Image (cartoon, grey):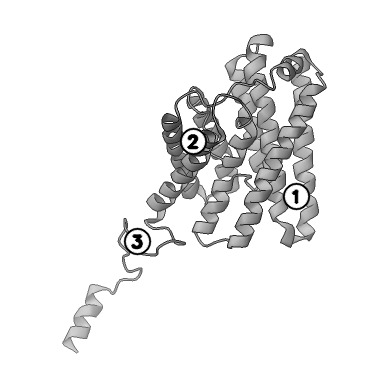
Amino acid sequence: MSGLNASLGYFVSAVIFAALVRTLLKKWPRLSFLLEFASSFMLVACLLEVQTIVEVGEWAGGLGPDVTLTIRFVVLLTHGIICGSATGNPTLVVLKFLQMEATTLSTLFAVAAQFLGAHLALLVAFYYWSLELTDMHMIKNLMASQCSSSLLVSSIQGFFTECVCTLTFHVVLLNLQRRSALIRVPLIAVLLTFLSHTARGYTSAYMSPSLSYGLTFHCPGFTFTEYAVVYWLGSLTGMILALFLYMGHIPRIFSKNLLYSQKTRFRVPKGEKGEKKKL
């Protein structure tokens, strides 16, 4: 229980940092890309600790899978509430770019900020583990340099796993984008928790290049290129497929709708057509 108390303090600190950055940047909308930095930092920092609880807490602390799943869901729900539109996910930033809702420069700044936030979160987590506040963190600190990779299958299997999970996530998200946040945020948190748990024996379904960079790229077992193919190319491919299935085209690349016919929005009543013919 003392381990969970320390983890709770760590979670709260990350949440407070993200909330403070969001509050301060309201006065400077031109620096809105820094919201992505804070969002990515909070998400990676918290999920690194969730990963510690899963890897160490389940066998050393006697915590059941139901506890770790609940913690993951609460973290994702809190992240959605606190960070709002700043998702900390590069695929969602690129999605807006492909929908022509964001410029090239703002997209590049946002993606760079997300990776910077993920890297800082990794450094903060390493320092936090080195303090060895609990037995769980002492064990994590000893195994930090030889962590277990989240990629448990071949690169090809991992690519298709990330692609399918990201495709599912974005299709649901695109269909919920006009819904109230009270409905959208909890449903997305449930979906992310479900996909992550389902793909635990494959890739853990990070569905975010910056998140995967912070959580597993530093672990031995695969090269940087192999990780990039699975977690970056796989998630980007899934996102593009989801956008194509949802809209029938990619606005930034081509405008012709290849899937859905565009029907006229307003139809002339049959009676009016008949009158026009007689005239």
Q: Secondary structure at mark 3?
A: loop
Q: Nearer the viewer, residue 183 or 109?
A: 109
Marks 2/1: CA distance?
A: 32 Å
Q: Residue at x 64, y 24 (%)?
A: 51
- The x, y position of residue 109, in whole percent, is 66, 55
The residue mark sitting in front, 3 or 2, is 2
Horizontal side of 140 relative to 55 (left or right) equals: right
Name the mark on residue 257. 3
Residue 119: horizontal and vertical position, in percent? 70, 38
Using the numbered discs, state the Cα–Cα distance from disc 1 to disc 3 in whole angstroms.
38 Å
Tell me if 38 is positioned left or right of 213 in this view.
right
Residue designated by label 1: 22
Q: Quadrant of residue 42?
A: top right
Extreme bottom residue here? 279
Looking at the rendered structure, the number of numbered marks drawn on it comes to 3
Tag 1's secondary structure? helix
Whether residue 11 can be seen here: no
* Quadrant where the image shows the C terminus: bottom left
Going from N to C along the chain, the mark reached first, 2 or 1, is 1
Q: Is residue 174 above or below residue 62?
A: below
N-term mark: 1 or 3: 1
Image quarter (top left, top right, bottom left or bottom right) of the N terminus: top right
Residue 190, visible in the rendered structure: yes
Question: What amino acid type should be assigned to the residue bearing mark 3?
Answer: Asn
Mark 1 and mark 2 in contact (Cβ < 8 Å)? no
Q: Who's the residue at 69% across and 54% down the image?
A: 33
Residue 108 point in image, percent of width and height: 62, 55
Q: For residue 237, which numbered disc appears in the image? A: none
| The label number, if any, that marks residue 230 in the structure image | 2
Q: Sort mark 2 into few (<14), some (14-19) or many (20+) by Cα contacts within 10 Å.
A: many
Q: SS at mark 2?
A: helix
